[in-house]
Image (spheres, rainbow, N blue to C red):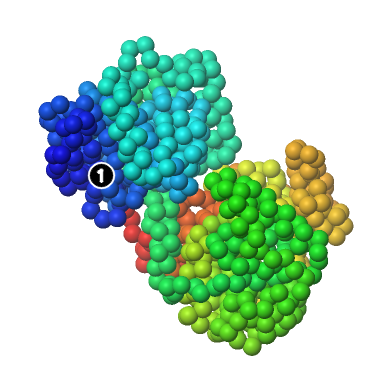
Amino acid sequence: MTTARNEAVEMAFDAATGVATLSLAMEGRANKVDETFARGLNGALDWAKAQAGLKGVVLTSSHKNFCVGADIDGLYPQRTPKDTAAYVAGLNSVFRKMETLGVPVACALVGSALGGGYETALATHYRVALDHGSVQIGLPEVGLGVIPGAGGTQRLPRLIGIQKALEQITAGQPARAEKAHKLGMVEALAPTREAVVEAATRWVIDNPRHTKQPWDQRGSTIPGPQPGSDDARNMFMAATAMIFKKTAGTMPQVEAVVSAMQEGLPLEFDRALEVERRYFVRCAVSDQSKDMIRTFWYHRNAALKAEGLPLAEAHGFKKLAILGAGMMGAGLGFIAAAKGLEVVVKDIAQEALDAAKAHAAAEAKGKKHLSAEQQQQILDRITYTLDYQDCAGADLVIEAVVEDDRVKYAVTKDVEPLLAAGAVFASNTSAIPITHLAKASERPESFIGLHFFSPVEKMPLLEIIRGERTSDEVVGRCVRFALDLGKLPIVVNDGYGFFTSRTFATYLMEAVAMVAEGHDPVLIEWAARQAGMVVSPLKVYDEVSLRLGIKGIMQREKYLGEDLSGVPAIRLMKAMVEDHGRIGKVAGKGFYEYAGRERHIWSGLRPLVRELFGEVKPDKTGVDVIADRLMLVQVAEVARCLEEGILVRKHDAEVGAIFGIGFAPSSGGPLAWMDRRGIRDVVTALRGLADEHGEQYAPPKILVDMAERGERFFPEV
């Protein structure tokens, strides 16, 4: 056995088989695609080619994962198109060398292969992946505002067909190994790391003539419709329409994937790579990509590492009691049991418990990567009960009952005496101050807010609210609990609505206010989408129910001492609920009419506005005007949360807004939105709204001061 090593690759050549094994072994815990990677792989290929009797190459990894993708630290500051294009061209030349080496090259994916890591695998002739639920394979680049730049948009459709490739790349969601195999993204699976390498080696030995990629062979075709055909054109047109419906034009990188693929596929392969490179560079040097990378990579990782937060080595929770078996309680019970906790779900109604049990069973059945026995083990860890005594010995309680402080006080007093020593009591309230709720507790230092988002099985954020007397130890244990559940934790200080709820409320109420002013509801909904918001406000109000919205308004009056009865938006909502029974989607009627799959804005909405307010007509309207207001009220509220100390860390503002309330992902978050708009311009726009609509729109002092000093929230890249 002949061996060697360079800065990125461990090399071994077995003269008996003629197979060279190249193991990616970059410094640190993971392989990442950067100049060191390209240089090391290039050198390793030259080394393999120089071995006498070479019959094939196996590319694998000595790290846990195959390759995690591009080096973001190198991509993020890159602003020069020429340099960016030169780097991508250099990487592509290495990949082209590998797939035209003249011998079979197989890739042994002993772990996850993402982004540039999977593009590396695509530049080999055959791929074997580890058959394990933790392994993910795919091209998630659109989530960082860019597209695959090392051949992904050209090799994948040539491998699995246009439609499947479009779906995989534009969604930006990696596939588990089993699904990747079914899609044709990898040709084979093996049960262990050793077996993966053995299978790849065996393929190389058994296929000595497999030395060219299909796209380098004359007359080759791709699966499904061929480039340039009517079917392919229709496929691209449909994809473009679906993307616009989903993103409203706010994600140019997703549209660039379609363009790169459509323009590149009919071309000779090296020319196709040039097409992809142009689109990649355009996206990579853009402001949008920088803002998305900052939040979706740096800020998200800061949250996952709990930077700046108390963090216990272990949360110490073994038994969890959940009070309330609604959708939130049912979902919480399942995800906690899936992480190994013993769970008790307590409610006062057997029907609610039965529904929660059925919900958990459905969730378990949906875990396709688990065996039936493993699914049942999760369900067996959950007890459903009407009796508080079953909560005895719990070391964590999550209260998820109705948003009424009297009810919350009562359940706190009922369950607290039953808990284990050192137990933590958490409320899942979305708005009521934690310090207020802690008045019912004998141990306010162990009382905390854990604000989960619905549906809890899918929503990644956990907003942790520190009450006035909540201890650092309890905060640290709850941060660890969040991470162990797979959630993104942010920690905020106490106050009505905390951070996410009060910010989201401004968005929803501004939409209703504009309806009351006479703006077209259809325009309002579209303007929100065009501004980049994940969900439109009137539709959201119907989802959460107008009745709940009114209850929240009453709570706000109670806790903040405000009189909101004369506010036009609130008058409109009360009239819809109290006079017309328009509660929301649950009743089949709210701002929208619901009839099966059909939905449209209620035709009686404008007549009701006229009835309440007369023939109102806004002085200025249109998509741009409406979108601006919807965004400005939110970013102003975020600034107030910083000013008041509710928000302590700026990255929590970005992570919380995007992952909790669907603030425009394409913007990178509310602070990034203000930076790109310019703080001075934000202040000017808010003052203009204040002059037109009232002092509630006046810019907070923190923004005024920043504008005067010419400051930004984040450094310019």
Q: Is residue 412 left or right of residue 704?
A: right
- Residue position for label 1: 24
Whether 237 is drawn above or below 532: the answer is above
Q: Is residue 566 above or below residue 422?
A: above
Residue 584 spot, x, y in % from top left: 77, 53
Q: SS for tag 1?
A: strand
Callout 1: few (<14), some (14-19), or many (20+) C-alpha neighbours within 10 Å?
Answer: many
Residue furthest out toward the right: 579
- Give the residue displayed 47% in from the left and 75% down from the top: 476
Amino acid type of the residue that numbered disc 1 sits on in the rendered structure: Leu
Task: Tell me if residue 579 can be seen.
Answer: yes
Question: On the rendered structure, is 523 left or right of 195?
Answer: right
Left or right of residue 201: residue 174: right
Q: Position of residue 183 (x, y in %)?
A: 49, 32
Q: Give the residue displayed 80% in from the left and 40% down from the top.
A: 595
The foreground one among 327 and 623 is 327
| Residue 420: x %, y % from top left | 60, 82
Q: Could you say which is closer to the camera, residue 298 or residue 176?
A: 176
Q: Position of residue 370 (x, y in %)?
A: 56, 49
Q: Is residue 91 left or right of residue 544?
A: left
Outermost residue toward the bottom in this view:
442
Residues 86 and 706: in front is 86
Residue 116 seen:
no
Check the image and name the residue furthest to the top: 219
Q: What residue is drawn where x is 27% and y is 48%?
A: 62
Q: Could you tell me how many numbered marks the image carries?
A: 1
- Locate residue 146: give its quadrant: top left
Identity of the residue drawn at 15% across and 39% down: 1
